[in-house]
């Protein structure tokens, strides 16, 4: 039963919980109820991206505190109110950080039902929890709705401290329809991706829309942090057959998979898909070894030097770094590698309601730089592609102003001159 997990939680226990679809919902319900009854003392929940808002996120469960590694939208307010801790990280670093900052952690995962040999598969998830299998205590919540996928994210029923069964459905992603700007940006990226390239597609409307423009490509590969419907569709259609991958030819590799019920069902024992721990998928050595590696990620603000603030607006935290820095850095060094950072040229300022440029002279005070200017390759808006690799400051500035919204270009030029970037 799910209540069996309480026998393994004592004062000061660190709980490491899978993200997204791998969240063990019933087990967390039991733990929160124990907190309401006053049975928890100084217990911390370490998790990267929860999908369900919970009372303990808001400090309402005595003895239970949330430690986040990537803020979901509903965690922003609790973080600013002091109810949630945030650990800065690149995604590849998270397993190591958890090893160093937890003591005898209890890993909580959702899995498939045991197969005929007693193996539980983490299905949609490898992430940091798969990195800890075999070295930390594990309690599993098994469900028939979790696909049994292949990869380095399985554990035997004899190796867990306990497990329970639930029929809870997996959460499905909500994909917004791309607007005209998104479609233009994604087309600009897709036309620069060669046949035979290996893809990492990040989170966001625009990155996912890129996949829709790749149906006429051939022999693409997948080595990514997140696999959503777009990338999996390329695998299922044969466009991404992985035949030209330098590493793991013929396989589509990811550490997390997110989609709808149809995608989860299609994943079950899929022969091409491999789910691996994040310190494998996002490791510099494994990314840089892929020839013609292409990374597509999004940002919220870019300054005239090419610095990308992808996780905060000024001092207001929106998310975290995720795997963007991992892939931007390694793809820049990979033979034939290309890194695309995509953004709409303008946004509505929440405070003033004004339309503002996302390409700015300098980032807002306190903004967090996610993608370092020296490793940013290409910035893409609906107005074009700015190629920054190996270019001078003045050339970078001109390229970025050229892809800003036309109504903001004069102001950006004046600002660039006052900053000494243009003369």
Image (cartoon, rainbow, N blue to C red):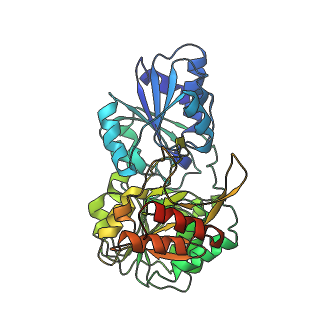
Query: The C terminus appears in which quarter of the rendering?
Result: bottom left
User: Residue furthest toward the right?
Assistant: 353
Q: Quadrant of residue 8?
A: top left
Q: Nearer the viewer, residue 203 or 413?
A: 413
Q: Nearer the viewer, residue 4 or 127?
A: 127
Q: Position of residue 263 (x, y in %)?
A: 59, 63
Q: Is residue 82 above or below residue 99?
A: above
Q: Quadrant of residue 180?
A: bottom right
Q: Position of residue 357 (x, y in %)?
A: 61, 61
Query: The N terminus appears in which quarter of the rendering?
Result: top right
Answer yes or no: is residue 269 visible: no
Q: Position of residue 47 (x, y in %)?
A: 48, 39
Residue occupying image coordinates x 32% and y 74%: 390
Residue occupying image coordinates x 43% and y 69%: 422
Q: Position of residue 48 (x, y in %)?
A: 48, 43
Residue occupying image coordinates x 58% and y 74%: 186
Side of 170 relative to 284 (left or right): right
Answer yes or no: is residue 152 visible: yes
Query: Disc count in the image?
Result: 0
């Amino acid at each position: 039963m799910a209540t069996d997990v309480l026998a393994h939680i004592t004062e000061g226990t660190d709980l490491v919980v899978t993200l997204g679809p791998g969240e063990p919902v019933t087990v967390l319900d039991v733990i929160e109820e124990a907190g309401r009854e006053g049975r928890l003392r100084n217990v911390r929940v370490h998790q990267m991206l929860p999908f369900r808002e919970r009372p303990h996120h808001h400090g309402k469960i005595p003895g239970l505190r949330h430690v986040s590694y990537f803020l979901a939208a509903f965690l922003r307010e609790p973080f600013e109110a002091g109810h949630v801790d945030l650990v800065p990280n690149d995604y590849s670093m998270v397993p190591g950080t958890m090893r160093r900052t937890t003591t005898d952690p209890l890993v909580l995962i959702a899995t498939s039902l045991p197969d005929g040999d007693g193996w539980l598969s983490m299905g949609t998830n490898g992430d940091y929890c798969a990195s800890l299998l075999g070295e930390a205590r594990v309690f599993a919540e098994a469900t028939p709705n979790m696909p049994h996928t292949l990869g380095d994210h399985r554990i035997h029923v004899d190796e867990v401290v306990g497990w329970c069964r639930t029929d809870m459905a997996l959460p499905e992603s909500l994909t917004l329809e791309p607007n005209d700007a998104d479609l233009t940006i994604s087309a600009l990226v897709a036309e620069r991706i060669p046949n035979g390239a290996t893809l990492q597609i990040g989170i966001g409307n625009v990155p996912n829309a890129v996949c829709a423009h790749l149906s006429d490509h051939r022999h693409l590969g997948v080595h990514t942090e997140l696999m959503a419907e777009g990338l999996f569709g390329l695998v299922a259609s044969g466009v991404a057959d992985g035949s030209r991958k330098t590493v793991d030819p013929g396989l589509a590799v990811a550490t997390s998979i997110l989609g709808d019920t149809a995608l989860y069902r299609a994943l079950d024992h899929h022969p091409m898909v491999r789910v691996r721990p994040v310190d494998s998928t996002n490791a510099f050595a494994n990314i840089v070894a892929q020839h013609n590696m292409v990374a597509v990620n999004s940002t919220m603000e870019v300054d005239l030097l090419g610095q990308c603030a992808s996780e905060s607006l000024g001092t207001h935290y929106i998310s975290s770094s995720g795997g963007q820095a991992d892939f931007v850095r390694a793809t820049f060094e990979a033979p034939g590698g290309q890194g695309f950072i995509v953004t709409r040229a303008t946004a509505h300022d929440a405070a003033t309601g004004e339309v503002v440029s996302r390409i700015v002279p300098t980032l807002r005070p306190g903004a967090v730089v996610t993608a370092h200017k020296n490793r940013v390759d290409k910035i893409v808006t609906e107005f074009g592609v700015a190629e920054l690799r190996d270019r001078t400051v003045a050339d970078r500035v001109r390229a970025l102003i050229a892809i800003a919204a036309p109504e903001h270009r004069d102001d950006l030029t004046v600002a660039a001159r006052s900053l000494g970037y243009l003369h």
